[in-house]
Amino acid sequence: MWLTCSSIGRKFVMAITGICLVLFVTFHVLMNSVALLWPAAYNVICEFLGANWYALVASAGLALLFIIHIIYALWLTVQNRRARGADRYAVNSRPPQVEWASKNMLVLGIVVLAFLVVHLIQFWAKMQLQELISHDLTAYPQVGGAAAAPEFGTLFLQAAFENWYTPVIYIIGFIALWFHMNHGFWSMFHTVGWDNAIWIERLKRIGCWWTSIVVLLFIAQAILFTVQANNKFFLTDEALQEQYAEYWAEQAQGLIEEYNTEVTAAVANANDMPSQQAAQQTFFAERGDYFTGKAESIRAAAAAQAPDINNAELANFAKFADFVKMQAERAAKLSQPNELLNQQ
Ligand code: HEM
């Protein structure tokens, strides 16, 4: 096939995947700007881009683009080195800065890839991947010692950018991205045949402006997020706290409903008071730890992420959490002598 067998076909694949990745990176930098201008709206976008089918299709497509781009890059590099041997840098008709990036495209790509690995561990793995793996909030990643819901991008900005090394790694990645994208633009136009002397100059200038604006925005965002995270902005902003409180109140409500359904089913067949009490005790002995664990996670998360919000549902939930904990402890104590008897 032309796209795999011929050298120009392979370069064409690099160009097409490159254009798509440039569009993704441009979308991404605009989305990050929302986190600066309107953080609560940013969380709504993050929720929209969570583990929903359309977001998963987009993520899979994006991963495929990256993989194809990387495989073809390695392929073309090996092919070029074989073809040119020791004289591979002999021809020098390009501007010096393009020439430098051209020789180092692979190394620059590897630096961008290394940044990407750190970046995906800090964000994607804790957000979309977490939603895919488990909705159990006791297994959620921790931010500031409490469970962080996968849709709250702002909490993961807090966790990532409060570390000194995050802006350092990111800015190194962004500088490599600038050289990589700038040269990518140049070679993309070259590959698709826009070699007209006037147009190639214009397109190169547009490419350089585009890359510079995107990368400068990324750098500015990384610096601003670092300042905000170190001032605990994402944990103290009132609008964000309202949003976190609302989320935890919904989770609390869900847990109470789950408890009501289970406890009603557990005592359904008990006809008199003693058998009802016995059924309740068995229920708490079996399910008490589950409800206590979840209730504690919700309570701790709400206290850590929305300490300044007076939410009536969360206040009532504290009573429920205490009740479930007390009942679970009581059931555990009552079942102990029985276990001892059973052992004897
Ligand atoms: C200040 C800089 C950046 C910040 C704060 C940032 C933030 C984020 C966040 C919060 C997510 C998770 C979104 C979600 O799953 O809903 C994400 C995902 C991602 N980011 Fe970034 N990002 C930055 C720069 C970059 C750059 C420069 C690249 C590429 C070179 C990049 C590539 C990706 C990719 C591939 C994903 C996964 C997208 C998916 O879920 O399909 N990011 N980023």
Image: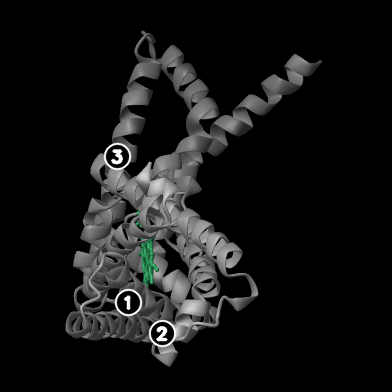
Residue type highlighted by circle 1 = Trp
Residue in the image at 21% along x and 72% along y: 34
Quarter of the rendered image showing ligand 1: bottom left
Front position in the image: 342 or 7: 7
Label 2 sits on residue: 98
Label 2: element kind = helix
From this view, report whether residue 339 is shown above or below residue 123: above
The answer to whether residue 166 is visible is no
Query: Does the numbered disc 1 mark a residue whose Cβ is under 8 Å from ligand 1?
Result: no
Residue 254, numbered circle: 3
- Vertical comparison of 175 with 144: above or below: below
4, 50: nearer the viewer: 4
Left or right, 118 with reference to 57:
right
Q: Residues within 10 Å of mark 1 (few under 14, many from 20)?
A: many
For image coordinates 27% across by 58% down, the residue present is 46
The span from disc 2 to disc 3 (Cα, nearest Å) is 58 Å
Residue 191: percent from the left, percent from the top? 32, 66
